[in-house]
Image (cartoon, grey):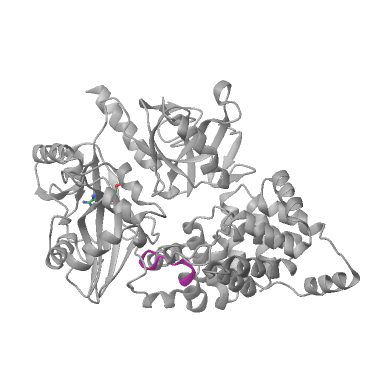
Amino acid sequence: MEYSILVTFYEKIESTTKRLEMTDLLVTLFKKTPPTIIDKVVYLTQGRLYPEYVGIELGVAEKLALRALSMATGLSLEELEAELKRAGDIGVAAERALSRKKVKSLLDFVSSAQALARKLMVEEVYNTLDKVARATGEGAQDTKISLIASLLRHASPKEAKYLMRTITGRLRLGIADMTILDALAIAFCGGKDARSLVERAYNLSSDLGHVARVVSESGLEGLKYFKITIGRPIRPMLAERLTTAEEILEKLGGKCVAEYKYDGERIQAHKLSSNVILFSRRLENITHHYPDACEIIRNHVKAEEAIVEAECVAIDPDTGEMRPFQELMHRRRKYGIEEAIKEYPVSLFFFDCLYVDGQDLTNQPYPKRREVLMKILEPSERAMPATYRIIDRVDELEGFFEEAISEGCEGLVCKSLAPDSIYQAGARGWLWIKFKRSYQSKLVEPIDVTVVGAFWGKGKRAGKYGALLCAVYDPDADMFKTVCKVGSGFTDEDLEKIPGILQPYVIEHRHPRVDSKMKADVWFTPSVVIEIIGDEITLSPLHTAGLGVLKPDAGLAIRFPRFTGRWRFDKSPEDSTTVKELVEMYKMQLKKIET
Ligand code: AMP
C-alpha cells in the first residue's frame, strides 16, 4: 500500500471537527488496507510503531531530524532551523523545505526525479522507522540520519510533513483506542454491535494492531482464540465512585470486602520464572523504573507464571510510613535510578491476581482470585496483601474508612463479593467502588480533568497561558466536555513549565472529540490530565459537561477551580473523571445542602 494513501487520510482526519466522521474515515482506510499490514497501519495512525507496552518509541530529536532533512534537500541546517522557527512545526517546515529542494547539477536533478518516481510504500516507511527507533550505541545518530534521509528523498512534500511528525513523535491525531475498535467492528465484524467482542480481545491483549490483524483476516471467528499472554498487559479494571457508606453497601448488596486505597502507582506485574515485567495503569512498560519492585515480586510471588496487581507506594526509609503519591513520582526518572531507589524506597500492596500457571482467573469471582493471591504471596514488610475487612454495616464501613485515612491512605476501594464479581478488564463498573476522602465538607472532591484549550494571560501572565480550559470525559459519546477554566493554584514554576508541556499537543482548531461552547485561544489534542479542586459544582450555561442532564441548556461547572499541583501523567485522558461521576457528585452535594 502506498504511503500517500495514509497521508491523504491524515489530512482528512486533521481537518474534520466531527467525531463520527473520524470513525467513517477509519473504516474506509481499514477496508483499503491489506490484512498483512493492517497492524502497522493501526500503529502508525496512532503515531507509534508498536503497542505502548512494548516500549519501543519514535521520538527522534528535532535537531537530528533537521540534519536528515538537510541531507535529503541540500538546504543548509541554518536555513532549515529558520524555516522551523517560522513554521513552528517540524512537519510544515519539512513540507516547505521539500518544495524548494536545492538541485545543484543536472545529475542531481535526474537522480532526484528518479527517486521521486518511486512511490513510498507503507511497509518501507514502517520498516525504516523501526530501524530508526532501534538504532542504539556508537554511530546510532548517523545511522538514524541516513535512514530518515533515505525516506525523505522518495517523499513528496506532503509525505515529508507527516513523516517528520511521526519520526519526532509529534503525529498526534488524537484518535482514541475506542474509535479504532468501533471502526474495526464496522469494517470487519458486521457492524458496531460486535464492538464489545472486539473490545474484549483488546482488553485481554492491549494490542490494537494484533486485534486488527485478527479481525481483518478472520472476522469475529478469529476472536475466539484470544487468550491472556504473559508479557502482554491486561487493561486494568477501574472503580466507580460513591461518597457515602450507605450508598456503597446498598450498591454492593449489603456486604462487601473493603480494602485500603493506597496512594501510589498501580502496577500490573507479569512474572515468568525469574523474569518480571511491570506495566503502569496506562500500560507503559515501567520495569526499569522499579528494579526493587521487580526483586520483591521475584522473591515473594511463589508461582512460575503469574499476573498480579499491586499498588506501589513510596515509604519513608526511616519510619516505614507511607509517603504521598507526589513523592513516588521521583521514581519516574530516566537517570539516577539507583539513588532514587535509596531515597524513595517502595512497598507493594497486592490486591488482585489475574493469571497463575496457565490458569486465566479473570472470569473467577473476586473471593476466589483473592484466595489464589494469598496462596502465592509470601508476605514481607515490603510485600503485603492490601489490608481488608469484610463488612456489612454502615458504621463499620465508616470506621474502617477513618482508619484507612489515618494510616495515610486515600480511602477505601469496596469490592463486590458476588458470584459475578469477575475481573472486568478495561471497564469501570460497580463491582469496585471507591470511597474517597472529601477534603472539606462543602468542597468538591478533587477531580481529574483533561486540558483541551488555553486562554492567553494578561498583566504578569502576558504572553503566557493565563487559564486552561478543562474537560471531563463522556465515555458513551467518546467526547471531552468542558467543565471549567482553571487559572489558579499554579506556582510560578508550573506557569513556566506549562507551555512546554502543552506545546506538543497544540492544534489549529477545536479537536473533534472536544465539545465546547467556549472559544479557547489555543486548542489541544486531549492528552494532558491534571487534578483540580473547587468550591462546589454549579449549573452553568457555559459548559457542556452534563448539558441538559439536570436542566435544559445548562451543564455543570466547577466553581473557583484550582490546580492541586498534581500532574496526572499516569492517567490517559480517557481516565479523567467522567460526566456521569460529576452528575453523581452534584446530586450528592445537593443532598448535603438539604440535610
Ligand atoms: P482512581 O485512580 O481514583 O480511579 O482509583 C482507582 C485506583 O486506586 C486504582 O487504579 C489503583 O491504582 C488504586 N488502588 C489503591 N488501592 C487499591 C486496592 N486495594 N484495590 C484496587 N485499587 C486500588
In the rendered image of this protein, does residue 359 appear above or below residue 72?
below
Q: Main secondary structure of the magenta part?
A: helix
Q: Position of residue 526 (x, y in %)?
A: 51, 46
Res 344 visible: no
Q: Position of residue 213 (x, y in %)?
A: 50, 74
Q: Is residue 556 magenta?
A: no
464 sits left or right of 198 in the view:
right
**Residue at 29 percent of width and 25 percent of height:** 442
Q: Which quadrant is home to the C terminus?
A: top left
> Residue extending furthest top?
459
313 sits left or right of 333 in the view:
left
> Residue extending furthest right?
106
Q: Position of residue 428 (x, y in %)?
A: 33, 52
Q: Position of residue 593 (x, y in %)?
A: 27, 23
Q: Which quadrant is home to the N terminus?
A: bottom right
Q: 170 or 5, which is in the foreground?
A: 170
In the rendered image of this protein, does residue 579 appear above or below residue 159?
above
The image quarter containing residue 420 is bottom left
Q: Which residues are magenta?
A: 203-210
322 sits left or right of 265 in the view:
left
Res 535 visible: yes
The image quarter containing residue 124 is bottom right
Q: 124 or 8, which is in the foreground?
A: 124
- Number of callouts: 0
